[in-house]
Amino acid sequence: MRRLRITVAFATIFASLFGGMAAAYALGGWLESTWFKGASALSNLLMLMLVFVMVFATLLVMAERKWSALMQNRTGPNRARINLPGLRSRSLAGLPYLIADTVKMLAKESFTPKAANRFFYALAPILAFGPVFTLFAVIPAGPTIPVLGHEVAMVVANPNFGLLYIFALASLAVFGAALAGWASNNKFSLLGAIRACAQMISYEIALGLSLVGLMMAFASIQLAGPAGIMEQQSQYLWSAQLGGFDVGIPAWGILLQPVGFLLFFAAAFAETKRPPFDMTECESEIIGYFVEYSGMRFGMFMIAEFVEIIVFSGIITTLFLGGYHLPFGGEWFAKLAFFKEHPWVYGATMGMVFWLKVVVVTYIQMNIRWTFVRFRYDQIQKLGWKILIPLGIVNIFVTGALLLWDKNSLGLLGLIGLFEMAFILILMLSSPKSSLYKPLKAEPLPSHH
Amino acid sequence: MAPHGLEPHAHDENPLDTDFGIQPMLVNMGPSHPATHGTVRLKVALHGENIQDCDVEIGFLHRGFQKSCENVTWAQCLPYTDRLNYVSPMMNNFGFLSAVEKLAGIEIPERAKYIRVIGAELHRIHDHLVATAATAMEIGGLTVFLYAVEARELIMERVTELTGARLTTSYGRIGGLNRDIPDGWKDKVLRTLDCVRSAANEIDGLLTRNRIFMDRTVGTGYLSPEDALDFGFTGPCLRACGIGLDIRKARPYWAYPELDFEVPIFHACDNFDRYRIRMEEMFQSDRLIRQALEKLPGGPVLIDDWRFALPPQETVLSSIEGAIAHFKLIMEGAQIPAGEVYHATESSNGELGWYLRSDGSGRPYKVHIRAPGFQILSALSKMVKGKLLSDLIPTFDTINMIGGEVEQ
């Protein structure tokens, strides 16, 4: 019974991702054929950003509670019920909380402190939400395939400065936090805003440096398109053919740039302002830059945080985990006769792969968030300036040297990357499991006389 | 805390050193602030993120404990003591009773001594779990907190089975205990201890070698051993300063002399060592409970002296002497001989001292407690001055200030 339920749940997830992507392709093809060439960008805007990212962010509110409950030996939210026949006594995996939360946010008074700067106070949530939301525009969520005789690309925009767009907009998000803290006219929120500024600006640099190696390896800063970073990851470093089925080690960013991946992951985590980097929030200390906000304005900050997680997971998937590409068998899969006849099935399947990778990266982020305690203000700066940035620079030089050495392929880079990964793995496994001090484990009772 | 130099000094030699009259930012942490559990107000003067001054203000939880005790009989004081350290009420109960018994010259039965050790040590684990959990939670480790709370809940259940209440235990009576341990309780406690130990191991795994946790706690909240002695530190906070004072060893009471345990000592005087000492003490308490349960002697749990202890119910109902003793004990209270006494027990946060004065009537003339948290809290200001605001949080947590006993 339990197995059946799990199977059904997973099938539902797969089916809805597949269906969503199929609908996105269909809508794009229909718009292309009925409206004008390039109209699919509009449908992508609607389907990818407003439907997929927003639904993911909303579900993530619930998923975070459930996943944290999973880690903490709790059941998680199960009290909100829908009073309809058949649903009355069911917790529905906590999904009614989404409705309850939304109603609460919308119905609560949106309070403005008397001494606040009203204009900036109202502007801050928008500035916090807007930039992170627009980040997703350059992320390709599926391959370009012909639908109804028109080529449909599953990306809102594909500028050749894709990565720079991400850096530029990601750094705008700091305005939301800074303005919120300053405009509330509250000492705690001001402290939070100052911390947010310092943290986000210093981690911008680490964020940028960590990707330079990747840009050099793929000689591109475009994300989608045939020359884009995503498409280049479909090639193999070393491959073999097993009766038409291709296996090998793919040229994924994580294999070419493991150090870059770790740096980017850490910096992106800091950009999302989530624990262990939640110096700006620190609910037990300064309560956060949004301490004065209530109602939907607070909701904007919250949803911005969750959208940011999804968007950064999307970026990590695109840059380091091969986007919508399968690790092996991709060529074989694309050549299947069925997919040749029905390219939209191929597109939707690949889109599903992309979103599944996003979910996995999000899950890793959640695990980290619920495992670690938070840094201190100065330690976060130390980590950024003294560890991440120098490592990023070293990574650039090493990558550059390896690329010069082996000019024709990425093989050497991949080999060193694998060594680096093995080294990191050994480092992780060799660290002491328990305390260095007296272990807290059972001792035999002393015999009494 | 007066704002210094409001006027810029125009004639400074180096223009970069010009004092622009920067005023500290006064931030009010508490009495209603997520970190100041126990309702205490910290008036913090900040220069940037650095604490220039920290003024601790208590009194929000003052309940007039000492005065209340003077108006009730000795036995009726017992429920008030539950609320002193509300994380380990049994220690307060037994500490008070021991002081009264010392004043009256009563020797309690062997079995009662062992059960008191078991109860006190259960609550020591409970208190340390809560302190550790709160420390972790305040610096962001909610998972650790919930692991600890899960283990704490098991102890709560055992305590409820033993005393009938989760918090307001009021367990024990002058001359022993009001009831014996329930049937099958021993095995349940042993199983609980196993669970608590595995939870403590989980917490240990999540925190002790956690780089971020160490960064937050190692070297922060430092107070030198000399200062610790001057301030009157006792208990885990003193033992984290390398001074191994433990009243269970120094002036043994109850069944402690017959039980084998160690007093863990650490030397760094910082938050990390205060955390570690609590983890080690939980382990020692675990050992103590296991030994005490194994060695638990038979016999009564209450003395058979009707001047101080209530007679058995059937005696009250069937004999005139019993009825009179019962009536006098309830209406007038136990007649504790006139005199004064100071008696201290090692509670979870340190020396819980009781100064009692009796005028020979059934009610206390004076009850004063030396709560360990008061002296420790008074050093908080010195511990955090000049440090970062973020250091205040783990420091406040590892000293484990309990509002109930500090403010009485």
Image: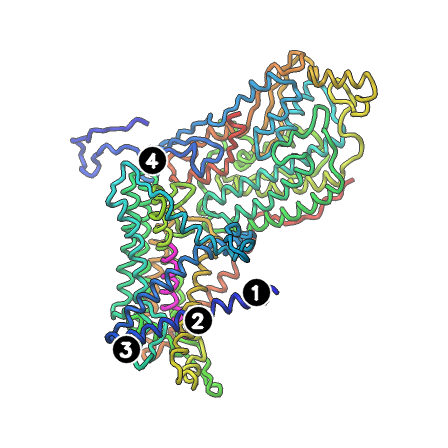
Q: Which of the two marks, 3 or 4, is nearer to us in this view?
A: 3
Give the amino acid at mark 3.
Ser
Give the amino acid at mark 1.
Arg
Q: Residues within 10 Å of mark 4 (few under 14, many from 20)?
A: many
Measured Cα–Cα span from mark 3 to mark 4: 64 Å
Residue A382 percent across, percent down from the top left: 36, 50
* Nearer to the camera, B162 or A99: A99
Residue receiving disc 2 = A418
Q: Chain of mark 1?
A: A
Residue A84 percent across, percent down from the top left: 51, 55
Measured Cα–Cα span from mark 3 to mark 1: 41 Å
- Give the side of residue A8 with respect to residue A335, left or right: right
Q: Residues within 10 Å of mark 3 (few under 14, many from 20)?
A: some
Could you tell me which residue is drawn at 57 percent across and 31 percent down?
Answer: B85
Q: Which of the two marks, 2 or 4, is nearer to us in this view?
A: 4
Residue range (magenta): A305-325
